[in-house]
Image (cartoon, grey):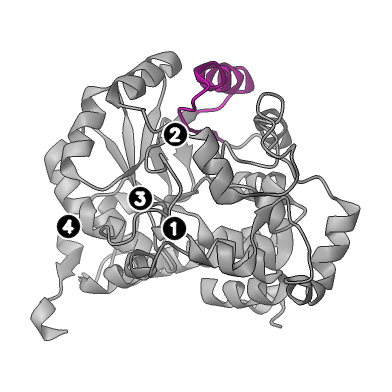
Amino acid sequence: MLPLKNCNNIGDLRLRARSKLPSPMFHYIDGGADDEWTLRRNTEAFDDYQLMPNYLNDISHVDLSTNILGCGLTLPFLLSPTGMSRLFHHHKELGVSKAAAEAGTLYTLSTMATTSLEDVAAASDGPKMFQIYILKDRELTKEFVQRCKASGYKALCLTVDTALAGNRERDAVYGMTMPPKINRNNFFSYAKSWEWLLNMALNPDFKLANVVHRVDALGQGAMGLIEYVNSQFDRSVTWDDVAWLAEQWDGPFVIKGMTTVSDARRAVEVGATAAMLSNHGGRQLDGVPAPIDTLMPIRDAVGDKLELILDGGIRRGTHIVKALAMGANACSIGRPYLYGLAAGGQAGVARAIEILKSEVERDLALLGCSSIAELRSDHISQLNMKMR
């Protein structure tokens, strides 16, 4: 197993995470829906675009700072919402949020977190966004809004692509449940991860901390993730509900999960200030386009009416640079920091952020840019598909 300090890229962190996690937890991070075509395409699609450098520019200092959602960040990427971080390391969401704050970027807490939004807010002074669903219990949704306001969250992020859970077959194959349940069928996959097992025994607090007081999500014992999602999420949500939520929040408001121009235009109409172009990491509807392929058409359609955050498939600094050059205001990462969390807790998250930061800084310099603001569309050329 590679030491954390010797992990040179996100792929190395992934391998270290795989060696440390029980199989159900690793494949929950790593897997997608159906045949996982979209999961693969999210990253592979970046290869369809090439960078066009301009040389003989002063790159003695490279500025990675940017502004997004009313926040000044020292990095052009933020951390996406990911559920149930306690599954991967006992530092859980607290470790992730602290690492983000120390790096000067924004952390997004999931509704399905294993730490309460209040505890995350108190753990660091970095900017935070809360990811929300419009649940069947509208009063719980309103409660989230009020709790976020009271706790100082900077923005609200509504996920719209999970009216029901995607067909994540790896969860069924490897016996993924929340909380973890060890039985004779999966015993050996847990037994090899002795460090994880020890911390489970010492820190057995697996709960959906933001909803446990209102929804007895796990009160009947180990429940499959698909069962929980399907029983609590509301398939009747429409754009009218989104407009209602935007009015309730009255601040920077992100809609996460859209991939089409028509949805982006509707987002403007209902009061969104930003869109997170995302397909849920390939975990929902398989066969939808990679976010990077939707970026330029959506930017052309909405102009500067929405801030656009590219979420999905990012594994390298060049991916971030390409997205920014193509019109994204910022990028967002999920799996990269989860691999880091599993690989080494808070220090592993910090390592994932540092890897991407150093890559982006180097890539900008080699591209001939001294700041994020200097990136332009003519730094990108789309490959002739017939040549590939």
- Which residue is at the front of the view, 190 or 259? 190
Q: Give the crowd class for mark 2: few <14, some 14-19, many >=20 residues within 10 Å.
A: many
Magenta-highlighted residues? 127-154
* CA distance for labels 2 and 4: 27 Å
Q: Which mark is residue 157?
A: 2
Of all residues shown, which one is farthest toward the right? 202
Residue 327 position in % (x across, y down): 23, 50
Q: Which residue is mark 3?
A: 278
Q: Which residue is mark 1?
A: 167
67 part of magenta stretch: no
Q: Nearer the viewer, mark 2 or mark 4?
A: 2
User: Which quarter shows the N terminus?
Assistant: bottom right
Q: Nearer the viewer, mark 2 or mark 1?
A: 1
- Give SS at disc 1: loop
* CA distance for labels 1 and 3: 17 Å
- The type of residue carrying mark 2 is Cys
